[in-house]
Amino acid sequence: MGINSIDALMLRRMFLTGAKNLEIQKEWINQLNVFPVPDGDTGTNMTLTIMSAAEEVSSLPEDAGIELLAKAISGGSLRGARGNSGVILSQLFRGFTKSIREYDVLDIPIITAAMQRAVETAYKAVMKPKEGTILTVAKAMADIAAEIRDDSDDLTVFFERVLAEGQAALERTPEMLPVLKEAGVVDSGGEGLMAVLRGAFDAYMGKELDLSFASPKEAPSGAASAHKEISTDEIKFGYCTEFIINLEKSFAEDDEKKMKAFLTSIGDSLVLVADEDIVKIHVHTNHPGLAFEKGLEYGNLCRMKIDNMRIEHQEKLFRESEMESARQKEEEAAKDAPYKEYGFISVTIGDGMSEIFKGLGVDVLIEGGQTMNPSTDDMLKAIREVHAKNVYILPNNKNVILAANQAKALVEDCEVIVVPTKTVPQGITAMIGFNPEHPAEENLSVMTEEISHVRTIEVTYAVRNTKIDGKEIHMNDIMAIGDDGILAVGSDIAAVAIEALSLVADEDSELISVYNGMDYSDEQTEELVSSIEERFPTLDVEANYGGQPIYYCILSVE
């Protein structure tokens, strides 16, 4: 007789194993991103989203019921959601957990109803749902669940049928989205969802997996984070010991083995690098003198360094405690301060871009964007920090807009206005278009209209061979990516940028702005600007230091 229900303990194990399986496969999922840019991040975003929930689930007592589990999964994933794929995953969890939280055990009818609610919730969260994505895979599984719900009460048979339909739907995604078919990949978000569910099924079937997790990556907003209090008693070897041996006798392979064996016997974290004339050693030990004496057997010592890690740890905790106390005092003072009328939050990357936004009056900058999508929780923290009646958020990336909207839905004590900026140049234009004399909604309308006239080109390099937008792309090729796809491919940054500009600029264009990245020098930028001025003599061209990583230059045409 098959299993016909699962309890809270099994649900917990299934969720954590699903999260672990996603974490294991995140780099593979990143590789499925259609654009071969060096910051493909679907796997990373989905992993950070589910890790936030896994951390909350792991902190619950072992005897926690389904209601507590549901709240931890929903709340953790909502706050930790990053990127479109992460937000959709969090909405799937939100819908599913809302449906199950009143039950003590889950059977097929309950799970089926929860799957349907999960899909409904996720579709509602996306303004323009697109088929051939994670939504399609989730819907296919919910549909088959409803179809076979009454066929059997055996959960094993049910789960196998649902997973098989999900995999089939995933394999159909290239037929629904031509861009996937052209690149020869399935949808990365759908693959991420299947990774979670395959892991959950493994747990249900009794497969053991190491469920220790790396902590979710700290938010790139610069906000202080809580640290785990670690006793210095947990530091087994207290002295970080480093030195170099200037060899005066031979140091053969056998000598290296003996040295490593000795140092390992008195410590850990050993690093030993032997060259022809010197040996560099790093070891954590309670007896630095013994390590030095052993080294003296082979020659004279130099660059000897001993750090007491227990004292350093205590000092670190003291500094963190002082910083946390200061932060709390600032927050308390901010709570008592009157709300200002308007405040601004901008997602940005690069010190130059940050300075531009500061100069335009942005109150809080969230470091992130394409290379690391900020989470919903990052947005919520920033909203509290702004302390304004009307808070404008500039996501400046199409993969951040959903997280911003999710934060908006969670805030009640102020009006949050998400300006749908998809690029940093659009964010800059939106800020320029703001007028403090106008009502909030009128400003949103004006800012949205202004950004519609901004066309952006991002120049970077390819990380793999692929075919997309009718273009053959090889690893390390230079690519110019426009608002709707890849515009130009070549081997020279300036040539690719100008080719892309020729496709974007038209008779209505007036201004070309160039923002050079951290890997594109001022001299190179000057040469590019000169070439642009020569190619487009009727347009104004201005250059600004952006400092962004990965993208050699970002250009905008207005």
Image: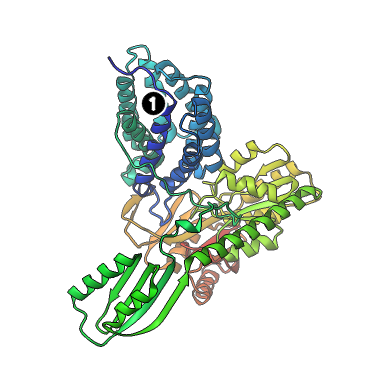
**Residue 521 visible in this rendered orientation of the protein:** yes
- Residue 363 location, x and y as percent? 70, 56
- Residue 263 location, x and y as percent? 30, 69
Q: Amino acid at mark 1?
A: Ala
Q: Nearer the viewer, residue 195 or 171?
A: 195
- Image vertical order of residue 92 relative to residue 7, above or below: below
- Give the residue number, with chain letter if any, for mark 1: 140
- Which quadrant of the figure contains the N terminus? top left
Q: Nearer the viewer, residue 554 or 240?
A: 240
- Residue 81 location, x and y as percent? 52, 42
Q: Nearer the viewer, residue 484 or 284?
A: 284
Q: Nearer the viewer, residue 319 or 174?
A: 319
- Residue 358 location, x and y as percent? 68, 61
Question: Could you tell me how many numbered marks the image carries?
Answer: 1
Indicate the secondary structure of the residue bearing disc 1: helix
**Residue 470 visible in this rendered orientation of the protein:** no
Residue for point 38% across, 76% down: 289
Residue for point 27% across, 69% down: 262
Q: How is the image coloured?
A: rainbow
Left or right, 375 with respect to 334, comes to: left
Left or right, 550 with respect to 266, comes to: right
Q: Using a 10 Å C-alpha cutoff, classify the residue at mark 1 as few (fewer than 14 neighbours), some (14 to 19) or many (20 or more).
A: some
- Image vertical order of residue 244 relative to residue 395, above or below: below
Left or right, 172 with respect to 316, comes to: left
Give the residue furthest to the top. 150
Residue for point 36% across, 49% down: 27
- Which quadrant of the figure contains the C terminus? bottom right
Left or right, 254 with respect to 124, comes to: left
